[in-house]
Image: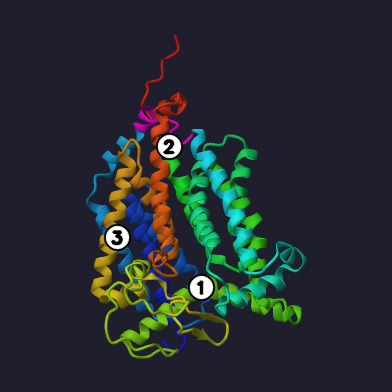
Amino acid sequence: MLAFDPFLKIVAIAFSVCILALALLFKTTTKSWTSPSVLFALFWFLFTFFPLLIMFTVPINPFSILYILSAVFVFGLPSLIINWKKNLEQNKQKIILSPMLYHGPFLTFCFYTMQLTVLFCILMNLKTQGYEPGEFVDDLFGTAYRYLNDRYNGRIIPNLYAQIGIVLNYTGVCIGGIVITTRRGLFGKLIVFILSFVPAALHMAIYADKGTLFLCASLFYGGVLLTRIHKGDTSLTNRKTNRIFLICFVLLLPVLLASFMARGIDEGTNEEAVDKLLFYIASYAFGHLYAFSDWFSNLTYGESMNVYFNQEHYTNGLFTFMSIFKTLGLPADVPDGYYDEYYNYQNIIQSNIYTLFRGAIQDFSFAGAYLYLFITGAALNFAYHRVLTARFPLISGAVFICMMGYIYSSFLISIMVWNSIFAVFVLLVLLLSMNKGLYKFRPYKIDMALATRMGLIKENPAP
């Protein structure tokens, strides 16, 4: 839509609220907050509602929100045919059958080893690029801005340290989410939390790479949820998790602001710096929805604020499975940012982020995108079914954690445009399998209080 219309914006907000209603429907049918259908719907409610409300005067095509609503519904459809009540009852049995599965020293050792290795890889990558750590200490913003320019201008040298660091960082933060739930004291949890996010925070501060931090947060949360589900808890959050979220926000907010400052916005007057900061925050947090809506309008009506490439043929999976295309040597000639068309509205919001939905439509058509989302929803809901019913969820556990990254990345693009997620999945399966093997040889005890509370053990009456 080319002009702001408050009625259309209200209609769009109504469609967004319908996504929340879908989440509640899926929660009722799956009987848990942690099912893929519920998580995907809740995520897209948040990532439509707040952009629509906060950027109220920015034009929107309500039919683009209706499409997202329908896509979320199609994604969740497979969850309606599974007997979740039976699955949840089976899941409770693991409190007795495989208690303390994730409490052993193996995963803790792997976590610390991987995260320390990532820090070493960051230092070696900087050295390879010709930077010294001291330069960032003396002038963080200026040096980070130079590194950012080098990255955008193609002057960064690909190297093994960077690749290993990325894979181990994502894997380590998944394990960190598992390990933190096994720590009893606040100090122990804080150590795990800090080490989980120090590499991602350095990526943000040094490389001006915000995506790594948020993707790490989603994978970390996936690890937290996996261990809580194993204990029979399928809630999204609790008092302890809320405390972790608060600590996360307090510690990482300065790093997030520093990553924006690394883009050179501190140049000029304070007022200009604040305006630039608000522009970058609005663009990164809300730009995806308005960019997708404008592209959607161009595709369906032939009218849009910005000019878009007229695609003559479907790309048959390129923007959904780009890493597989590249691995197989198939043609995958796309810009560095995946799309070189920038949506801009009156210089208050700008983005070349068009969500997973644009890529799916370009790849498979509108109907094909629905089919892709239905198959994906079926696969992820089946994995969640196995997480609940398997005594030792290995492949399904790894899928569940990676799913959190898939859901987060959906506001950007398909997570499978990066080959690192496949490496993370393989490493997670390997580590969880080794943990299962070692678990059988170590003593464990049943949490009698939890088993009693879950109704698995009858409480003996007082004499």
Placement of 98 over or under 378, stated as above or below: above
Residue 31, how many percent across, how many down? 33, 46
Frontmost residue, 12 versus 281: 281
Residue drawn at point x = 36 percent, y = 60 percent: 21
Mark 1 to mark 2 CA distance (whole Å): 41 Å
Q: Is residue 101 magenta?
A: yes
Residue 254, how many percent across, how many down? 67, 62
Q: Is residue 95 magenta?
A: yes
Mark 2 to mark 3 CA distance (whole Å): 28 Å
Residue drawn at point x = 34 percent, y = 56 percent: 37
Q: Which residue is mark 1?
A: 286
Question: 10 Å neighbourhood of mark 3: few (<14), some, or many (≥20)?
Answer: some
Residue drawn at point x = 31 percent, y = 74 percent: 330
Residues under numbered marks 2 and 3 in contact, where contact means CB atoms less than 8 Å apart: no
The residue mark sitting in front, 2 or 3, is: 2
Q: Which residues are magenta?
A: 93-103
Dot 3 amino acid type: Thr
Question: 10 Å neighbourhood of mark 2: few (<14), some, or many (≥20)?
Answer: many
Can residue 33 be seen here?
no
Q: Is residue 383 left or right of residue 43?
A: left
First along the sequence among labels 1 and 3: 1
Dot 2 falls on a residue whose secondary structure is helix
Residue 396, how many percent across, how many down? 34, 47
Residues under numbered marks 1 and 2 in contact, where contact means CB atoms less than 8 Å apart: no
Q: Is residue 339 left or right of residue 362?
A: right
Frontmost residue, 107 versus 240: 107
Q: Which residue is mark 3?
A: 376
Q: Which residue is mark 2?
A: 435
